[in-house]
Image (cartoon, helix red, strand yellow):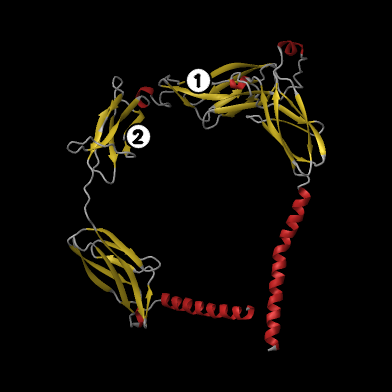
Amino acid sequence: MISMISRRIFLILIFLMLLLISFFPLINAVNTIDVTNKEDCCIGGRIFGGVCWVTGGLSGAVIPFASVKIVDVKEKHCNLIGLFDFRGLKLNRTYEVVADAHGYDNYSMFVTLTDENPVEEIYFYLEKNDEDKAVNKPKASIEESSCDGMIYGTVFGIIGGFQAYVPFADIEIEGVKKKKCGLQGGYVFRDLQINRTYNITADSYGYKKRTERVILTEEKPCEDRFFFLEQDLDENSKSKTLDIDCCFSGSIYGVVTETPEQYYAPPPIPFLTIKTDYKTTKTNFRGKYRLNGLPLNEEIVISTCSSVHYNDNETIILTEENSEQEVNFQITQIPYEPRGRIYGKVLGIKGDDHIFLPFANIEIEGLENKKCNFNGEYEFYNLELGKVYNVTADYNGYKKLTKNISITEGSRIHQVYFNLEKCDDIKSKSKIFGLLDFLENFFRRADSFKRFISSIIY
C-alpha cells in the first residue's frame, strides 16, 4: 500500500515539473514584451497637397516621395501613395516632425508619445508655393539634391494597331543606369540628380529602339515617360518577330444555344468551353463568347466541349478582308438514360466476428477492376440496364467469392456485401496477417496501459 502511494506521489511530482518547464518560456516572453514595448513606439501618417502634379492638379491629392523627418532623429521619403512611418521611438518624449516637398511650403508638427498613446497617426496638408515664393526661393545645389530626382513609366509595343505591354524590355539612362522592365513593362529610376538632362533609351527584341530626353528641375523633379515601340519589320528581324498580318488580327465571336424545341426560343448555354488550336474561352452567362488574336489565311477549327451535350465544330478561314466572323452554335442536350449502381463492403470472417478488409480487390468481369478503400467499401456506377454482372471479391489469405447481379429497370441500385472465408491453406497466408495480428495485440496492450494510467491518476 505504501509503495502504491509513493508511486502516485512520484508521478504527480514529475507531472508538475513538466508543467513548470513548459510554462517557463512563456513567463520570460511576457517579461520581455513589457520591456521592449517601451521602445516599440511609432509615428506614422500620410502627406497630402493642395495641388499635385501626379494626379493632374486635383486638390487633396497625395504627394509621392515627399521628404519627412524627425528633427535630430531620422529622415526618410514617403512611398508612392504618401505614407510614412517612424519606428523604434521612445516614450515620454516630444518629437518635431517636418514634412517638405518640391513646390510646397514645409510644415512641422509636435508629437508627444506617452504610455497611453505610444502610437500616433498624423496627416500633413501642405500648401503650394506662390510663384513669387518659388522664384525667390534659393536654388539647391546639385550635391544637396542629388537623390531627389526620379524617372518612371511603362514600355508599350504597337502590334497591328493595338498597344501591348513589353515585358522585360531593356531600359537605360545613358551613362547612369541600366535595368530591365517588369512583367507589365513598368520601370523606375530613383536617386537622380536634378537640374540635369538625361537620355533614356528603351529597347526590346523585335522592336525599334527609341530614345527620349528628360530634364529634371526643382519645380518638376519627377517625370513619367511612356515608350511606344514600333515593331522592327526589316529583313533581319522578320524571322524573329511574329507577322502582324498573320497572328494578331483575326477574331471569332458568336453565341451558343440549345436546339430550340417547338414554340420555344432557344435558351443560351452559359459557361460552355469554346476551343480552338490557338485559344480557349468560355461563354458568359448569356451564352456569348469571343476569341481575339487568331491567325489569318489559315484554317481554324472551332468546337464546343460539353459533357452533357452533343458537341459540334466549325472550320473557317479568316482573311484580311474578313478578319472578324460570327460563328453560332446550336447543340442538343444528351438525353438522360437511367444507369445502374452496385456498392457495398468486403468483409472477412474471423471466428464469430466480421472484419472489414482494407484495399481488397473487387472486379466486374470484363468491365472494371478496382480496390476498396480503407474501410473495405467499393462502388460501381454508370452500369447499363438489362445486363447481368459477375462481381468478384478477392483478398490475400481469403477465398474468392463471386456474385451475379442483375441490373434491370425496376432494380437499378444494389447493395452487395461480400463475406470472405479465411483460407486454410498454409501457403496462402501472407505476412500482412502477421502485421494485422501485431497491430491488434498492440492496441489491446495500449488499452490496458491507458486503464493503468487512469487508475494511478484517479
| Residue at x 74% of width, y 52% of height | 33
Please state the total of marks drawn on the protein image: 2
- The image position of residue 271, as x and y in percent, is 34, 39
Residue 386 drawn above or below residue 326: below
Residue 345 lies, in percent from the top left, at 33, 69
- The quarter of the picture where the N terminus appears is bottom right
Q: Is residue 34 left or right of residue 186?
A: right
The image quarter in which residue 174 lies: top right
Q: Residue at x 78, y 46 (%)?
A: 38
Q: Secondary structure at mark 1?
A: strand
Q: Residue 278 sits in which quadrant?
A: top left
Q: Which one is nearer the viewer's eye here, 263 or 273?
A: 263
Write down the residue under mark 1. Answer: 228
| Amino acid of disc 2 | Tyr
**As rendered, which of 402 and 299 lies closer to the eye?**
402
Image x and y of residue 333, in percent: 23, 43
- The answer to whether residue 131 is seen in the rendering is yes
Residue 137 left/right relative to 62: right
From the image, tell me which residue sits under label 2. Answer: 278
CA gap, disc 2 to disc 1? 27 Å
Q: Amino acid at mark 1?
A: Phe
Circle 1 packing at 10 Å, graded few (<14), some (14-19), many (20+), is: some
| Kind of element beneath mark 2 | loop
